[in-house]
Amino acid sequence: MAATIKDIARRAGVSTATVSKVLNRKDSVIGDETRQKVLSLARELNYTPNSLARSLVTRKSHVIGIIVPDILNPYFTELVRSCDDAARLRGYTTLVCNSEGIAEIETAHLTSFGGHRVDGILLAASDVVPDTELLDALRIPVVCMDREIGPLAQLVGIVDTDYRSGAYQATRHLIEKGHTRIAFLSGAPHRSNTQIRLSGYKDALSEAGIAFDPDLIRCKEFQHRFGHQATLDLLDHTSFSAICCMNDMLAIGAMVALRERGKRVPEDCAVIGFDNIYLSPLLEHPLSTVDRRIAHSGRVATDALIDFLDDADRTLTAVTITPTVVSRTTT
């Protein structure tokens, strides 16, 4: 039998009204210990609110649309999982679409969301710049996660990662390990998120008195196949002792290329990634990486969206998450 608010209240030793306030984020007068106990029990008991009953009363669908560019990338798999978990606790379900990083596909998904009457949309990181005219026309609240967006009346939340700091920390970590010839792999070179990462990399080099060498830069896409291809190209054309990769999939591709060329990690070449996906510590050589707190980002974005849906007078939520280096055996 499905758990109810009464079950949570009984286990937590509080009233059903208290549980309801916590689950609906109307808990400003409730102590943090009680709040955390209620949320923990809701997860433990796999509590799912009766969305159908609520929809009949509120005339909302209680469905949130999520668009990611590549669901096969473990980063987005983890992100979607955390968004779905957070939405479920608040009485919402999710509808997930994969855009392949193609503007036309994303536009088709956004149009479909309008037809399905989703209450809100979460747009995950992508090189695609959203169709803001369409989003304004749909009049559906939007939260953007780590992506560029133009002026948008329906924008209610922005959750960003401090990529400059993350890239700086990753490069600095390699420099502190004694490396001065550090290759840099990232996504599309013309996108601002790549330029921001590159600036963090350059800052760390400059601070250490190391000259920037454009021959060490390879930017195209955030795919393991590019990490593999770019590393082989670097090995053919220049010398380096470390690779700073701007996501973990690039780092995985880079390590495959190094292994194919008989290079040992980290003895012959150190590698650091960015994301800290769940696979990173499970590799043959556990991957040093930059932890961007994936699950936390998803929860913050989802809660920001639902908070707005519950109270349209709320102001724009803007959160920047500062990443940190996790040192493992590849550096």
Image: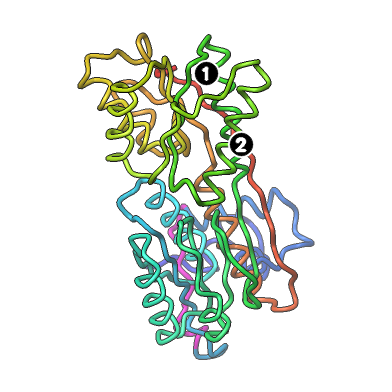
Locate residue 144 relative to residue 84 in the image: left or right: right
Q: Nearer the viewer, residue 175 or 157?
A: 175
Inspect the image, locate mark 2, and give the three-letter code of the amino acid beneath it: Ser
Locate residue 314 relative to residue 243 in the image: left or right: right
Q: Earlier in the sequence, mark 2 or mark 1?
A: 1
Q: Say if 188 sits above or below 10 in the image.
A: above
Q: Residue furthest right?
A: 29
Q: Which residues are magenta?
A: 44-55
Residue located beneath label 1 in the image: 174
Where is residue 27 shown, x and y percent of the image?
72, 63
Q: Say if 272 sits above or below 189 in the image.
A: above
Residue 53 highlighted magenta (yes or no): yes
Residue 126 highlighted magenta (yes or no): no
Residue located beneath label 2 in the image: 199
Q: Secondary structure at mark 1?
A: helix
Quadrant of residue 325 within the rendered picture: top right
Inspect the image, locate mark 1, and give the three-letter code of the amino acid beneath it: Leu
Where is residue 296 shown, x and y percent of the image?
56, 48
Mark 1, Cα crowd under 10 Å, few <14 / some 14-19 / many 20+, is many
Q: Secondary structure at mark 2?
A: helix
Identify the residue shown where x is 52% and y is 14%.
180
